Amino acid sequence: MMAVSQASSGAVLEETFYIFSKKKTVYRVRLTEKGLNLQKESNGSTKTEAILLSDIVGCRCVRSRRKSESCVCRPSVGSGSGNSGSRKSASGKSDVAPSYVDDNSSEQDENDLSAYLHIYAYVMKKRRGRVKSDPQHSSGKRERTTITLRFRSFDRYEDNLREAQRWRVAIKCLMRNKPVPKSVLCNGDAYEPDVNEGRMGWGPEGSPNGSPLGRGGLDAEGWDDSRRLLVLLNPKSGPGKAREIFQRRVVPVLTEAEMPYDLHVTKHAGDARQLMRSRDLSKWSSIVVVGGDGLLFEVLNGMFERPDWEAAISIPLAIVPGGSGNGLAKSLCYYSGEPYDQNPVLLSSLNIVKGQPMPMDLARVETKSQIMFSFLSVGWGLLADIDIESERLRAMGGQRFTIWSVARLIGLRTYSGRLSYLPVPGHQPIISPDHKGNSAPLPRSISQSAPRGNRDLDVPDETEERKLGVFRSRSYHEDMGNGGSMRERFGSVSSRSSMGDGLADDPDGVVGRPRLDSFYSVASRKSTFYSAAASSYLSAVGSSLSVSSLEYDGNNVGTAIPPARMYGPASRLPSLTQPVPSDWKVIEGDFVMVHASYQSHISGDALFAPNSKLADGIIWLLVIRAGITRAQLLQFLLGLSSGTHLKCPLVEMIPVRAFRLEPKDSSSPARGHLAVDGELVDYGPLQVELVPSLARVLSR
């Protein structure tokens, strides 16, 4: 092969690749600040393909395992799931892909002096013959593309490798929005790595790790991502395929991007929460959750159980959908216009390697016994009942919601209570044109009136709460005893979570409610992972990340893990026992459901709030009062997938800053469920306020 460097306006690097087997075919490859431009000239015709820099996840220098006859610059398209697909030669005919090995491999072909550069990209391809039926369904699909450049201008492999490294360094710099070194831009001379380039931490090909550049360098806020990722995996989220998802579909993308990681497999409910509040999180650049929204709920609230919660919550979060709902993962793709339904795991993996930290609203939720932070939704009534009661069908994945929706429509319930809210100035409620206000109350069904036999879904009384390790907060009961005169600040509330410490063995021999799902031992064959370079797979049994062996890594190094205590920003609202301010609006009566969300989707197929943004400072409060028919509710449920549910009669969507929900009949056996991010919480008064841009999540 003969490669000729040329100076061109706007091009960082430019070379012409000649193919000896086709004398009239050449490839002209230009690297610009926008990406790669591939121009094929053959028999007087020209074809051009552009690979955007934003679609490139990484590049790697390799050497052939066997001798390759042709000189190529060829893109290869895979399945888009992180696995290599078939390769095509420059002539367009499929051939067997040559084998490549690392430069230090003992299997390298000493007779082939060529150096190869693999450039990995995930390009948006349009799907032919598909008509876009609505804005949220994209007609495109991301496919894996590998560009292979062969360098053979010199008679020594080391010289060819330097040329390949020149392109690799330039691509890495452009990906990180860093200036390309002058030594890379020199035309005609062999590239010699600069001393400063050795600090860039670009993986095993000549540069040590640990630089402040890492994946994306330092952003405007000084985010240092040279550290490793912390991956938390729940092996039984949803249908129980999180292990397989991570091993087969996430790890290949991390490997291509040369991103090292530490993996922790959760052992029980509350494991991730305790890990978050007890470990030194500064050693990781981001925290990746592989599972459902429930695991992210644990991670988030574990961060707020740390004295240094402000530093902890500034660490960017990422989620790979492996659960039943996957509301946040779908919302992130919805905001960026990505085709989530085509390959949700791939798009979430690309958020990890290509995303930037974006601010995300959180909600502070206060009940009688605990304070927590929510990233997704708070529900009471129909949707919460479906979410909580369908847990027994967890093995079915997302289909469990559909099946239980039918059951709840047959045995429809109404609930009595009071809803108070603070509306957002300048935003009007979204009300169906057919909305006529309150209609005749819907009769309560027999299924609601009759006692339920499933004791697992009942909220324990105070005696049972003590056995389970759940303690009521001081603010609520002291206000009751003092006539409601004390307003408790959030930072001084000492409450325990029923998800964390409530699962530990009680000193009196009473064991907390175990997790409903069991899973394989992490020592089994199903926990074998193909780790990226310099990454480690840390078993939950006897590992350095095992919660059973953790010691507190905060100021009291070497001491035992302190008891859970919730920190975070203080509430700006009156306590639950105080009346709401005069500028709040109040609705009192019977409801079919009250559901609030701060994301667009509450599950992968439920577009709950089409106008929602990641950090818009709005709680989207949906209210359905008694009087709606089952046929109208069926129309509502079917419309959730496309966002047309807001056109159904008796459906109100109200933008609010905060709200308080006070259910009545709290002692009734048919009192329903209160759910926060899909997790069951105490049934009783509940107050929610939005905290704008409190967390950060990786998104493109």
Image (cartoon, rainbow, N blue to C red):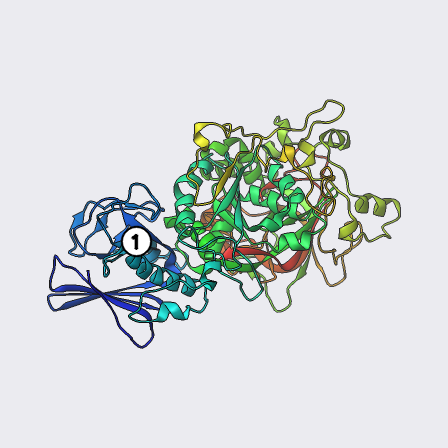
Q: Camera-side residue: 580 or 338?
A: 338
Residue found at the very far bottom of the displayed protein: 9
Quarter-wise, where is residue 296 in the image?
Answer: top right
Q: Is residue 188 above or below residue 346?
A: below
- Indicate the amino acid at tag 1: Thr
**Residue 467 x %, y %:** 74, 28
Residue found at the very far front of the displayed protein: 156
Quarter-wise, where is residue 580 in the image?
Answer: bottom right
Give the quarter of the figure containing the N terminus.
Answer: bottom left
Residue located 33% across and 43% down the image? 105
Residue found at the very far right of the displayed protein: 482
Residue located 87% across and 44% down the image? 481
Q: Is residue 151 above or below residue 547?
A: below
Q: Camera-side residue: 512 or 523?
A: 523
Residue located 61% across and 62% down the image? 617
User: Seen in the image, is 104 located left or right of residue 526?
Assistant: left
**Residue 38 x %, y %:** 26, 64
User: Seen in the image, is 671 located left or right of residue 645?
Assistant: right
Q: Is residue 607 above or below residue 36?
A: above
**Residue 73 x %, y %:** 23, 58
Secondary structure category for the residue under label 1: strand
* Residue 206 shows in the view: yes
**Residue 480 x %, y %:** 84, 45
The number of callouts visible is 1
Q: Residues within 10 Å of mark 1 (few under 14, many from 20)?
A: many
Q: Is residue 161 above or below residue 301?
A: below
Q: Which residue in the protein does label 1 denote?
A: 146
Q: Camera-side residue: 130 or 241?
A: 241
Residue located 60% across and 40% down the image? 272
* Residue 288 shows in the view: no
